[in-house]
Image: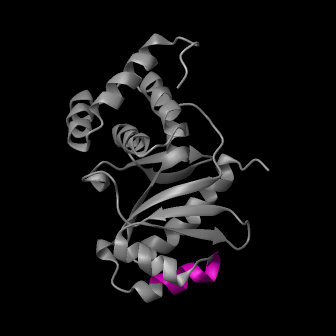
């Protein structure tokens, strides 16, 4: 079953409403954002990064999420403690979201932009530079899909803050990956395998 961008945007909006009630900042990342900045592609879930600093009552947050989503309490608590990821599954639609309790990027919440993802559904998303940098970190960790996403974003996004991109890539240890993918993005050679 193909999942539409509209379905994923509505899922993110539903999660965002709960997070906002608890004063939690969030932004989308991952496949939905890569498709927004690059080329449209299928993705099976929504990836959301949350800033847990403002959350004063974890139990209340968990209980509010549990009203709408299937969620495992042990995994939720471990994700908060370890600054990792937990999943929620929408009870109505059975769509999934991966929620990351920490960002792989420094200051990612300082670069959020509001985007009309689809049908006037505006959601906070990572900046194009942070989207690329996040994908570069995932490539470093072994993600093959992220290579195609970065190449697509580099081809489509023509007004990137290259100084920020290069400086942060160096801090994250992904400079060589960025250079390699820039060469591929600039070549438009259909024979290059990502």
Q: How is the image coloured?
A: one colour
The x, y position of residue 50, in whole percent, is: 40, 64
Residue furthest to the right in view is 1
Towards the viewer: 78 or 157: 78
The x, y position of residue 21, in whole percent, is: 44, 77
- Depicted 27 relative to depicted 73: above or below: above
Residue 106 vs residue 130: left or right? left
| Residues drawn in magenta | 61-69
- Depicted 112 relative to depicted 74: above or below: above
At horizontal 29% and vertical 73% (from top left) the residue drawn is 53
Quadrant in the picture for residue 109: bottom left
Does residue 63 belong to the magenta stretch?
Answer: yes
Of helix, strand and loop, which mostly describes the magenta segment?
Answer: helix
The x, y position of residue 181, in whole percent, is: 41, 25
Residue 27 vs residue 87: left or right? left
Residue 85, visible in the rendered structure = yes
At horizontal 21% and vertical 30% (from top left) the residue drawn is 163
The x, y position of residue 117, in whole percent, is: 55, 46
At horizontal 51% and vertical 56% (from top left) the residue drawn is 47
Quadrant in the picture for residue 161: top left
Residue 23, visible in the rendered structure = no
Count of numbered badges drawn on the protein: 0
- Depicted 162 relative to depicted 186: above or below: below
Does residue 100 belong to the magenta stretch?
Answer: no
- Depicted 19 relative to depicted 27: above or below: below
Towards the viewer: 102 or 54: 102
At horizontal 44% and vertical 81% (from top left) the residue drawn is 77
Quadrant in the picture for residue 20: bottom left
Towards the viewer: 107 or 175: 175
């Amino acid at each position: 079953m193909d999942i539409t961008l509209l379905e994923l945007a509505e899922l993110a909006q539903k999660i965002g409403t709960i997070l906002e009630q608890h004063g939690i900042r969030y932004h989308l990342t991952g496949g939905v954002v890569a498709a927004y900045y690059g080329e449209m592609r299928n993705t099976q879930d929504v990836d959301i990064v949350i800033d847990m600093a403002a959350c004063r009552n974890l139990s209340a947050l968990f209980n509010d999420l549990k009203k709408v989503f299937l969620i495992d309490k042990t995994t939720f608590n471990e994700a908060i403690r370890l600054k990792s990821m937990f999943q929620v599954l929408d009870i109505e639609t059975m769509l999934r979201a991966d929620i990351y309790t920490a960002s792989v990027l420094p200051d990612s919440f300082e670069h959020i932009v509001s985007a009309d993802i689809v049908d006037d559904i505006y959601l906070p998303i990572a900046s194009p530079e942070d989207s690329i940098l996040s994908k570069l970190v995932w490539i470093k960790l072994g993600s093959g899909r992220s290579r195609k996403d970065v190449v697509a974003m580099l081809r489509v996004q023509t007004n990137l803050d290259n100084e920020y991109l290069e400086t942060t890539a160096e801090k994250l240890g992904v400079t060589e990956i960025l250079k390699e993918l820039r060469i591929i993005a600039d070549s438009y050679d259909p024979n290059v395998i990502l």
